[in-house]
Each structure stands twice: as C-alpha cells, then as structure tokens.
Amino acid sequence: MKIIDIIQNWSGYFTYPIYDENENLSEDEEERVDFKMSMNLHHGSFSGTAEDEESKHLFDKPATIKGFIEKNLVSFTKQYPCLYYINEQGKLAIDPQEKHPIIQYTGFLNETEDEIIGEWEMGESPGEGDWGEFMLKKES
C-alpha cells in the first residue's frame, strides 16, 4: 500500500486492562472497544478524527488525532474533547472543564494486510498510567 495524500478510513479496536474491586490488575481479562479513524494524509503526516463505541455518546464531536507515518512506523496522539472517566458509581462521565490526557499510539503498518498493530499509553510519564493494544484495518 502506497501512502498518498488522501483521506483514509480505518476501523478496528483498542484494549485496556481490567481491575478488580481491590484495584488489582486482572491478568486474563481486558476490555476491547471498537473504534474508527478518519485521517487526512499529507506527505507522511496526518490529522483527523476518531470515535469509539465506549465514549462516542458522551461527546458532541469526535476525538482529534495527529501523527506521522515513517516507513512502516505509525505514531499518533488522540485527544478527546474533554475529560471522561469512570465515576464512583462505575458509570462513564465527563468533565467539560477539564482536558483529557493525550493518548499516545505507536504501531507498525503491515502493507500486505493493510493494517496497523501496536500499543497505546496515557500517563504523566512513560510506563505510568493506562495502556493497551490496538489494531486498525484500512477500509476499502
């Protein structure tokens, strides 16, 4: 697949770990969330939007993405319109006055399969905070 200056749509999923009621990490469970991205590619850089099935009903606009593709390395950030979190009742909630932390995605493009597979993380510094895996497949 040759990367050219066009709008491309991708769909797939991301995962994140599940914790028990004592905040212990479940080793054999993870949450899997479907999501879609639309990216406008221009000379190896891209920007666009992303929506996921877990949070799209919370916002009146999609998350924004910005990144680059260099050879088969794909790196981008995702920024939700505002902070969203799980409240004390275990429900998703938003705080429109607070920014959501930037989420960093890093993966590799498999041109034969038209897919990107990698990892994401969100936190103050590398190795801290939340993390998971993702997979995106280019839509025809």
Image (cartoon, rainbow, N blue to C red):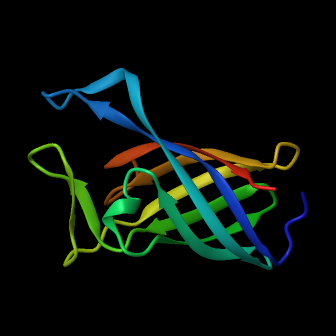
**Direction left: furthest residue:** 88
Near-viewer residue (97 or 121): 97
Relative to 51, 24 lies left or right: left
Relative to 44, 119 lies left or right: left
The residue at the point 55 percent across, 71 percent down is 49
Q: Quadrant of residue 29?
A: top left
Q: How many marks?
A: 0
Relative to 127, 138 lies left or right: right
Rendering coords of residue 129 (x, y %)? 31, 49
Rendering coords of residue 87 (x, y %)? 14, 51
Rendering coords of residue 118 (x, y %)? 61, 45
The residue at the point 82 percent across, 56 percent down is 140
Near-viewer residue (75 or 64): 64
The residue at the point 27 percent across, 67 percent down is 83
The residue at the point 90 percent across, 57 percent down is 1
Q: Quadrant of residue 80?
A: bottom left
118 to 122, vertically: above or below = above
Relative to 93, 36 lies left or right: right
Rendering coords of residue 26 (x, y %)? 31, 23
